[in-house]
């Protein structure tokens, strides 16, 4: 039994019998949950009783330190207020849609005299007609291509009608535009064509096929066989587009079908879009920590967030289940957002019930696939790291793995890279570069010794000084060295020289992918297809890639330095001014002496020196 304290228990006793919203807060005053209630007294008190709660609610209750309430006149007001509070505070324990994908829609702004067919990612309440969403850019391109092959819509962004007629573009010549910019088409004729476009996008393909068939027959009769063949192929494409969409045996109104699948931990919402009597696509949304909640509550929570942002609400919304007594509230709320009639139902039998079951089947499939992907991901990351630790004889799980690699060109511009994998995944903010300072020439052994020594010396200094925002204080559980026993021995010795105990370490000999442990006489050879070896290879390859990129950057800077700053009288300031003026070394080479002398900070003598130094390259 949790003792809530005198202050909180007094607030619980004084809860009113009124509709409203409540906000649960943690010890820091952060709002962790927002809810609504027909009766605040009954609903809020239920959280503080010693009764069974779902795992999510139990976890939330354990963090409650205080709560606040806001009274409302009606249940609908409470629903709207809850939506606004969740949107504002984004509480941890509420259903939060984190999906940032914006699927493409097609838009026709009927307020324009000559509307265009546009692609957009966000819906606005601007009076335009929107069609979609389409799952993927390929689907949008298919639809646009089909529309433009049948209806010669304009694609230009000119403001029409123009003040004076213009010359039509090539689209007019090839029959892809009616050229309203050139006065070749009246607004009435264009509007008639737009009517056909709207029918097509609403799913009325038969009119389009009839028109294409008529044109094909006319072309064949006129012996324009090439054009007839093109039209035949286009009819086939349109029919293919029709077949890829699932036919729905119902009225032609717009519908959204919503269902949920749960696995005890998480929930998966599936929404299917029916437009013009055809299912044009769907999407699913993972709701973390909602696997143990009431399905109706999960769907209702999803709807209040999804349709608040969607801006496009269909005429009919069919749900698998909703909380008792809440259908009317949600329906009124949806009507208020849409600005016109919306019907919200939870069908229990008949054709509409079958459609909802289809959404439920898709939700279960999406959740199953997501869990399978997560299992595979865990096998390749956390599981692979754990197995690697066991193979190497480690007693504890290697949470942080660091990989090191040396890059140089014949001993010049020698650099080292340090990459970090945490729980088997790259942690790119932890990556570091090192310039080799004490080693001359291409000596990977001594270079590794220097780098590991500096890395651990940094960590020791940060720990002693209590440095804020420390970059090296988090020490590795396991270190990978790109190389064999010799490289591994030098790297390990660097840590021993500091009086520290080295962590688990191993070298990866690239030729045969052999794993070498310190002082081992024979290597460990893993099966090439195991997640453990693949993880080791990813760490090694990432260290190599990261080092090569840094080395190329330094090499490029050194090249510029040697070509410009080595010229007598040309220092960093003049080099910067020349590159800014001419854009590149080639630009400087092609400039004449007067132009070089005119650059800020330059003079005739310096310009002459630049021309002389770069002349051989220029002449060659």
Image (cartoon, rainbow, N blue to C red):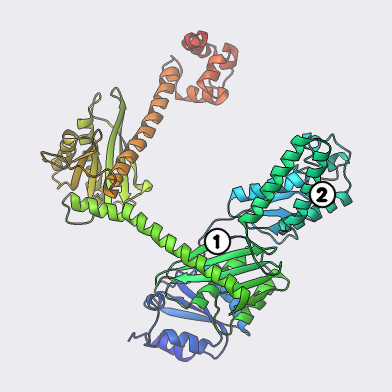
| Residue designated by label 2 | 114
| Residue designated by label 1 | 283
Q: Can the viewer see residue 553 in this picture?
A: yes
- The quadrant of the image that shows the N terminus is bottom left
Mark 2: few/some/many CA within 10 Å (<14, 14-19, 20+): many
Pointers 1 and 2 in contact (CB under 8 A)?
no
Q: Position of residue 613 (x, y in %)?
A: 46, 11
Q: Nearer the viewer, residue 418 or 269?
A: 269
**Residue for point 52% across, 86% down:** 40
Q: Can the viewer see residue 311 in this picture?
A: no
Q: Nearer the viewer, residue 595 or 382?
A: 382
Determine the image quadrant of residue 8.
bottom left
Taking the image as shown, residue 350 lies to the left or right of residue 380, namely: right
Q: Position of residue 306 (x, y in %)?
A: 58, 66
Taking the image as shown, residue 495 lies to the left or right of residue 40, namely: left
Question: For numbered disc 2, what is the local secondary structure?
Answer: loop
In the rendered image, the vertical position of residue 83 relative to residue 553, given as above or below: below
Taking the image as shown, residue 391 lies to the left or right of residue 366, namely: left
Mark 1: few/some/many CA within 10 Å (<14, 14-19, 20+): some
Q: Position of residue 322 (x, y in %)?
A: 55, 78
Q: Nearer the viewer, residue 235 or 82?
A: 235
Q: Position of residue 207 (x, y in %)?
A: 77, 55
Could you give the CA–CA distance between mark 1 and mark 2, rounded to whole angstroms? Answer: 33 Å
In the rendered image, the vertical position of residue 164 relative to residue 118, given as above or below: above
**Residue for point 53% across, 18% down:** 586
Determine the image quadrant of residue 328.
bottom right
């Amino acid at each position: 039994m949790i003792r809530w304290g005198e202050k909180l228990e007094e607030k619980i006793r004084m809860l009113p019998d009124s509709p409203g919203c409540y906000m649960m807060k943690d010890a820091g005053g952060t709002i962790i949950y927002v809810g609504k209630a027909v009766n605040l007294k009954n609903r809020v008190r239920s959280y503080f009783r010693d009764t069974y709660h779902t795992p999510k609610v139990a976890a939330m209750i354990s963090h409650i330190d205080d709560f606040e309430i806001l009274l409302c006149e009606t249940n609908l007001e409470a629903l709207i207020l809850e939506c606004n509070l969740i949107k504002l505070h984004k509480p941890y324990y509420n259903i939060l849609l984190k999906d940032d994908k914006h699927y493409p829609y097609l838009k026709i702004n009927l307020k324009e005299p000559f509307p265009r067919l546009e692609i957009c990612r966000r819906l606005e309440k601007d009076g335009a007609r929107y069609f979609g969403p389409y799952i993927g850019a390929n689907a949008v391109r298919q639809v646009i291509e089909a529309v433009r092959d049948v209806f010669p819509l304009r694609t230009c962004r000119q403001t029409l009608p123009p003040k004076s007629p213009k010359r039509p573009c090539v689209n007019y010549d090839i029959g892809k535009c009616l050229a309203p910019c050139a006065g070749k088409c009246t607004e009435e004729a264009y509007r008639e064509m737009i009517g056909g476009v709207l029918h097509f996008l609403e799913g009325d393909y038969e009119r389009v096929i009839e028109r294409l068939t008529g044109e094909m027959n006319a072309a064949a009769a006129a012996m324009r066989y090439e054009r007839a063949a093109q039209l035949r192929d286009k009819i086939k494409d349109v029919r293919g587009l029709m077949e890829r969409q699932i036919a729905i045996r119902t009225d032609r109104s717009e519908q959204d079908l919503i269902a949920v699948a749960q696995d005890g931990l998480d929930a998966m919402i599936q929404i299917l879009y029916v437009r013009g009597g055809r299912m044009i696509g769907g999407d699913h949304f993972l709701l973390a920590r909602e696997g143990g909640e009431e399905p109706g509550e999960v769907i209702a929570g999803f709807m209040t967030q999804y349709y608040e942002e969607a801006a496009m609400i269909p005429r009919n919304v069919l749900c698998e289940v909703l909380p008792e007594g809440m259908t009317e509230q949600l329906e009124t709320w949806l009507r208020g957002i849409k600005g016109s009639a919306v019907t919200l139902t939870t069908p229990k039998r008949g054709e509409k019930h079958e459609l909802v079951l289809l959404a439920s089947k898709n939700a279960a499939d999406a959740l199953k696939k997501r869990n399978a992907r997560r299992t595979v991901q865990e096998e390749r990351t956390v599981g692979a790291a754990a197995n690697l630790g066991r193979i190497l004889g480690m007693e504890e799980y290697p949470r942080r793995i660091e990989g090191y690699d040396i890059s140089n060109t014949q001993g010049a511009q020698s650099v080292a890279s340090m990459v970090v994998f945490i729980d088997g995944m790259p942690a790119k903010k932890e990556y570091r570069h090192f310039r080799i300072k004490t080693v001359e020439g291409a000596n990977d052994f001594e270079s590794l010794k220097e780098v590991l020594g500096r890395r651990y010396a940094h960590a020791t200094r940060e720990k002693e000084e209590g440095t804020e925002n420390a970059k090296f204080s988090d020490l590795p559980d396991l270190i990978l060295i790109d190389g064999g026993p010799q490289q591994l021995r030098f790297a390990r010795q660097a840590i021993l020289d500091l009086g520290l105990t080295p962590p688990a370490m191993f070298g990866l000999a690239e030729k045969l992918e052999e794993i070498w442990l310190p002082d081992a006489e024979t290597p460990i050879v893993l099966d090439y297809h195991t997640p453990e070896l693949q993880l080791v290879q990813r760490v090694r390859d990432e260290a190599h890639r990261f080092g090569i990129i840094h080395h190329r950057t330094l090499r490029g800077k050194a090249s510029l330095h040697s070509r410009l700053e080595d010229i007598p009288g040309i220092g960093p300031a003049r080099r910067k001014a020349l590159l800014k003026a001419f854009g590149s070394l080639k630009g400087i080479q092609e400039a004449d002496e007067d132009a070089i002398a005119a650059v800020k900070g330059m003079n005739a003598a310096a310009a002459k020196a630049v021309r002389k130094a770069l002349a051989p390259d220029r002449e060659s």
